[in-house]
Image (cartoon, grey):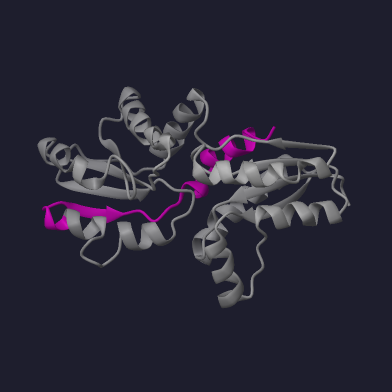
């Protein structure tokens, strides 16, 4: 048993299809980049952990449980690497949980979430924009971020601004649960004369929010709302974790 490990911490998802292509892929890339280290998993969403246990019989540890498992396995040095996009609520809770156990190890280091340094934004923009199909002059991409009440919600506005600074005038960012919301962008989408829109989740996984809030058949999904506004809508069900460029950034954040 190796004495040093990476604990990969994700919010989690109950959707196996997207988990296999995102969280699993991130962890595999970590293992390839650091073959001398053991890889452990933890989710921060207790709701998702409960669903997986009851529905699928899959045990996923909380951060606290993962720390205890690593201690029992004889791990001495721990690197905690979140797959979180923001330095927000989930990341702060993770850090607090880790700090309760760090005295049990020789060393514990914590890596940065996806969007932390200025260069992270440029790298994420490159990875995201190159994943899109070629767009017509009357077409735009609308990224669905999660949004948060935490002050790091400003990340989404900064990202939108930086997309345009990079020359991607037809890529826009809105959130499910934070500013800017879809309604805040509606006038812009019409004034720019777009006829066709690509919807794509700006989340590590393409789970509940992507399948329901973005692409769902309910009248309050973004797809349905935008179609009623007269746009031709295409949904790309691809989480950020499916993009090798995004995974590379997370791997590079391992301290």
Front residue (pair 162, 116): 116
- Asked whether, in this view, residue 84 is left or right of residue 111, the answer is left
- Asked whether, in this view, residue 93 is left or right of residue 209, the answer is right
Can residue 146 be seen here? The reply is yes
Q: How many marks?
A: 0
Front residue (pair 169, 134): 169
- Asked whether, in this view, residue 167 is left or right of residue 70, the answer is left
Location of residue 78 by image quarter: top right
- Residue 80 horizontal/vertical position (percent): 69, 42
Instruction: Give me the residue at 85% from left, 43% from top.
Output: 76
Q: Can residue 249 be found in the magenta stretch?
A: yes
Instruction: Give me the residue at 56% from left, 41% from top.
Output: 92
Instruction: Give me the residue at 10% from left, 36% from top.
Output: 191
Please give the range of residues in magenta.
Answer: 227-255
- Residue 113 horizontal/vertical position (percent): 56, 37
Rendered view: 20 above or below 155: below
Front residue (pair 208, 21): 208
- Residue 174 horizontal/vertical position (percent): 30, 42
Can residue 83 be seen here? The reply is no
Q: Can residue 125 be found in the magenta stretch?
A: no
Rendered view: 103 above or below 161: below
Q: Quadrant of the C terminus?
A: top right
Rendered view: 57 above or below 133: below
């Amino acid at each position: 048993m190796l004495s040093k490990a990476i604990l990969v911490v994700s919010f989690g998802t109950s959707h196996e299809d997207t988990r296999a292509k995102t969280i699993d892929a991130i962890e595999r890339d970590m293992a390839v980049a650091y073959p001398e280290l053991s890889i452990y998993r933890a989710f921060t969403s207790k709701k998702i952990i409960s669903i997986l246990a009851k529905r699928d019989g899959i045990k996923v540890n909380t951060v606290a449980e993962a720390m205890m498992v690593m201690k029992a396995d004889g791990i001495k040095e721990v690197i905690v690497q979140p797959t979180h996009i923001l330095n927000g609520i989930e990341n702060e809770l993770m850090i607090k949980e880790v700090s309760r156990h760090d005295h049990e190890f020789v060393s514990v280091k914590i890596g940065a979430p996806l969007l932390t340094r200025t260069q992270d934004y440029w790298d994420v923009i490159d990875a995201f924009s190159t994943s899109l199909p070629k767009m017509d002059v009357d077409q735009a991409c609308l990224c669905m971020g999660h949004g948060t009440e935490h002050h790091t919600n400003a990340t989404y506005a900064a990202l939108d601004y930086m997309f345009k600074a990079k020359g991607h005038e037809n890529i826009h960012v809105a959130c499910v649960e934070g500013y800017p919301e879809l309604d805040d962008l509606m006038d812009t989408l019409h004034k720019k004369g777009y006829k066709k829109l690509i919807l794509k989740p700006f989340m590590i996984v393409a789970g509940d929010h992507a399948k329901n809030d973005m692409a769902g058949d309910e009248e309050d999904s973004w797809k349905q709302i935008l179609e009623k506004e007269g746009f031709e809508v295409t949904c790309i069900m691809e989480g950020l974790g499916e993009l090798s460029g995004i995974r590379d950034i997370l791997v590079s954040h391992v301290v």
